[in-house]
Amino acid sequence: MSGAPPAVSEELLARHGLDQQEYRRICGILGREPNLTELGIFSVMWSEHCSYKSSKIHLRRLPTRGACVVQGPGENAGVVDIGGGLVAVFKIESHNHPSYIEPYQGAATGAGGIIRDIFTMGARPIALMDALHFGELSEPKNRLILEGVVAGVGGYGNCIGIPTVGGETVFSQRYGNNPLVNVLCLGVAPRDQVFYGRATGLGNPVIYVGAKTGRDGIHGATMASEEFDDSSEQKRPTVQVGDPFLEKLLLEACLEAMQSGYVIGIQDMGAAGLTCSTSEMGSRAGTGIEIELDLVPQREPGMTPYEIMLSESQERMLLVTEPRHEAKVREIFARWGLDAVAIGRVTSDGLLRVRHHGQVVAEIPNQPLADEAPLYDRPAGEPAYLRAAQALEEDAIPPPADWREAVLELMSSPNLCRKRWIWQQYDHMVRTNTVAGPGGDASVLRLKDTGRLLALSTDCNPRLCYLDPAAGARAAVAEACRNIVCAGGVPLAATNCLNFASPENPETMWQFSQTIDGIRDACLALGTPITGGNVSFYNETRGTGIFPTPVIGILGTLESADLVTPAAFQAEGDVLVLLGPDGPEQVRLAGSEYLEVFEGKVEGVPAAVDLEMEKRVQALLAAAIRRGWIRSAHDCAEGGLLATALESALQARGGLGVELVSSGAAPAHRALFGEGPSRVLVSVSADNAAALLEHAKAQNVPVAVCGHVARGAVRVVYNDAELLTMRVDEIFEAWDQSLERRLHPERMVQDEAVR
Amino acid sequence: MKTAVVVFPGSNCDHDAEHVCKTVLGAEVRQVWHMDRDLGPADLVVLPGGFSYGDYLRTGAIARFSPVMESVREFAGRGGFVLGICNGFQILQEAGLLPGAMLRNSGLKFVCRHVHLRVERTDTPFTSKYRVGAVLSIPIAHNEGNFYASAEDLESLEKNRQVIFRYSSAAGEADAASNPNGSLHDIAGIVNRRGNVLGMMPHPERASEPQLGSDDGRPLFESILAAVAERVEATV
């Protein structure tokens, strides 16, 4: 063993994000003190990012089993059976910290990383989605972050040729110094051609493929496991640089090698690079791996073992093949112009043995390194803010002074305005499978040659999660599933990206634990097991953390293209029907978009989702779509009934408008802008309205007829009082142009001057 | 019809072009790797969209040196039909098979959306199934689609009626608001003088099935089918 043990100072440990107790555990595993390379290896594998040490005991409560689940959490991505001999492989992952430090590359490599996770399993990636959270656009810095992140996701996805088909973008001051960039990737593979990250077969060669290893990204995983402070921008060198062209070649070469039957196990080198891929592949298979670092393709001379093992250079993979296929594997990669080098072999001793110039520089048992990071049951306590934030006098919230102005302001608010400026920068059509693209409730992709389709949705309303984390998490699952049903699908399985502040703060841990309970309840009730995901802690800067933000991704299936249902109105005269609970208890201004936009508050106790009611509403809607009754369906969420109706009109072609006529005991602004769970606004032809109403009553789902699809104008009547009449194109302009105007306030000033 | 779809490193619309030719039109399709010099028996060669060589240098600038391009040039020289879509158009320009060059979009952003195109000519093998002045809805998806050519080249393009598609309004008017990328003369697609090589930035292969929102691109492929059938008849 070369390399003398380091003089382990507190400072050295702190730089590696380890504490004394963890260090003692390392010494126990090794039976000696680690050298510096080994210390580095442990520090990345035991970082929060890689080990889930603060979250694991909670994550165990999530439901991960179901008839459709082929592979649950623990592999590179979840795998579910979608029928017809096919599986879907999907997962969502965060790249929050890098995207704050370097927005373009942070977001780009976030996309690159999750794409690798999918094709590592043998699946061809067919779609991306992004769930983005930014600070307020009045801050120039947040505009730069948004521009960079969108360009980064687009730059990577467009080049590699995977369509970005949807997602969501949320703005709140809480994400100002901690933007969230979560990217979901979906792939499809034949059921019998799924690959796993397992290094089996003693003596089998371990082959390194893809980009050369450089000094970039060293300690990226550790950076992602710390809070930010004023010096964080100095961490820019820990952000990697993406090369989507190289990944495109890697994708094609890997799929070719896998389909040719030459691959035994394969894993991408993401966070913690070579360290993570070797130790995890060995650990899963119960084997050892021995590698010689001199053989690792390197971008620059003089790299130390520490640097090579910890590098997070992008677009690299590790695979295990049989000796007789080694030449074939090399040939495939050579054709794509890529390095494929045997850097070691599978051994029986269960050790990760790393040599450099022939000398052993690290020797660590794989299994404890990969799986025995300390687990923490961190203290949790109800946050101090909660009671004050929940106290809200609903009746004291004033109605709008001017309904016309209020509608224009709300529909052009950052959260409700059209996100065309973002998704127009994404190629959302390449591969010609996108049947329903960005802007709708869920995106729908056809599976060519099968007649079947998949639907995808991501969701989280962080205001609800802040005001009641468990209820907010239930609402996120319920809404993501509801979106799938609105688009014509049936929810099948879930993935989640849990974005939180520092786990060392008991209030965060309480939020986290509550969130897990909420996700569990909703996923069990709605039959969507969690198949994988990611936890991102430490989204906190100078003591201010983000709202708890559990982004839920739901995958659904459609048996036929006839079921695809738009959110946009289709024909003048169609009858509007609101499905779901609509009483004053279920529809509140607490935690609503209205309350934030007009009162600047995130307060109150939002109406909690009744999961039994949710199931009934979704079942009713799915059945009604299958009977051919539904012309359009749109989830009634942020902005309430009025915003929902407007969105369906604004997305329609041919200048359709809406006449919204409703009544109730609540004041008009609460009934029209209030938000509540389990509600869907559908439009049906006049002929089918009666059948839908009758069917809803039989299924014990509240329904209300609330107007019809009009032409050209918006008219709102509540309790027989006319509140609003305006042209739909006036609202369209505000809704459609808002994001661009907010991003370029200087142009707005010019516009004003011109006028 | 026998179709060869050329695959460069970084092509990403190769499968889409294959799908349209094979499944929608029932043509025979072969993928031809860019290192191959043999196009095989082909009536149509498609240079698909994508990011050949990552487009890290000028778009199409490296791909034009691929060995297959020599065969494409010979094929075009013999009068074979060549269709370059998006990156394929850019490669044809770099290879000198079509005039002009693509600048970055005037908005400096990648743009993916449906645009309207006006059909300028129907007496070509690519457009016989359209009518002159028809307005098509076909998507674009590019960062460098801002057509530029010297004044002389532009004059010659117009004089020889080589502009096949122009960006337009839904009503067929060419105006600045309908031009998505700043292209000179609103140019979206051009042919060579002989009329057997078409380059276009919009993606007809993404608009050939109603399920995808538009099938306005399908007649383009059907026109090629008809032109190939005519040729076969002529030789028989």
Image (tube, coloured by chain):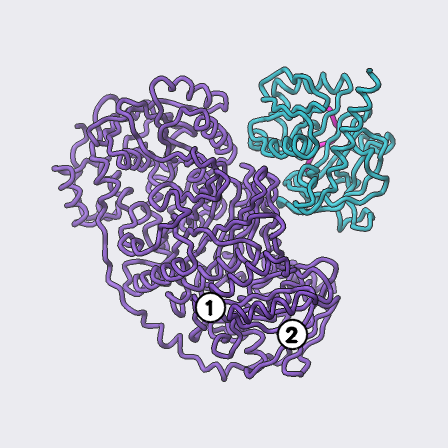
Chain colours: A purple, B cyan
Question: Secondary structure beneath disc 2?
Answer: helix
Residue A405: mark: 2
User: Residue type at mark 2?
Assistant: Glu
At horizontal 38% and vertical 50% (from top left) the residue drawn is A66
Chain holding disc 1: A
> Which residue of the protein is positioned furthest toward the right in this rendering?
B159
Q: Position of residue A674 (x, y in %)?
A: 53, 74
Q: Position of residue A465 (x, y in %)?
A: 41, 65
User: Residue type at mark 1?
Assistant: Met
Q: Picture quarter containing residue A197?
A: top left
Residue A613: mark: 1
| Res A597 seen here | no
At horizontal 51% and vertical 73% (from top left) the residue drawn is A581
Image height of A329 relative to A405, above or below: above
Q: Is residue A45 rendered to the left or right of residue A400? A: left
**Which numbered mark, 2 or 1, is in the foreground of this view?**
1
Q: Earlier in the sequence, mark 2 or mark 1?
A: 2
Q: Picture quarter containing residue A683?
A: bottom right
Task: Choose between B29 and A335: the one closer to the eye.
Answer: B29
Q: Residues within 10 Å of mark 2 (few under 14, many from 20)?
A: few
Q: Quadrant of the C terminus of chain A?
A: bottom right
Question: Secondary structure beneath disc 1?
Answer: helix
Task: Choose between A161 and A199: the one closer to the eye.
Answer: A199
| Res A525 seen here | yes
Q: Residues within 10 Å of mark 1 (few under 14, many from 20)?
A: some
Q: Which residues are magenta?
A: B97-103
Task: Choose between A683 and A236: the one closer to the eye.
Answer: A683
Q: Position of residue A733 (x, y in %)?
A: 69, 62
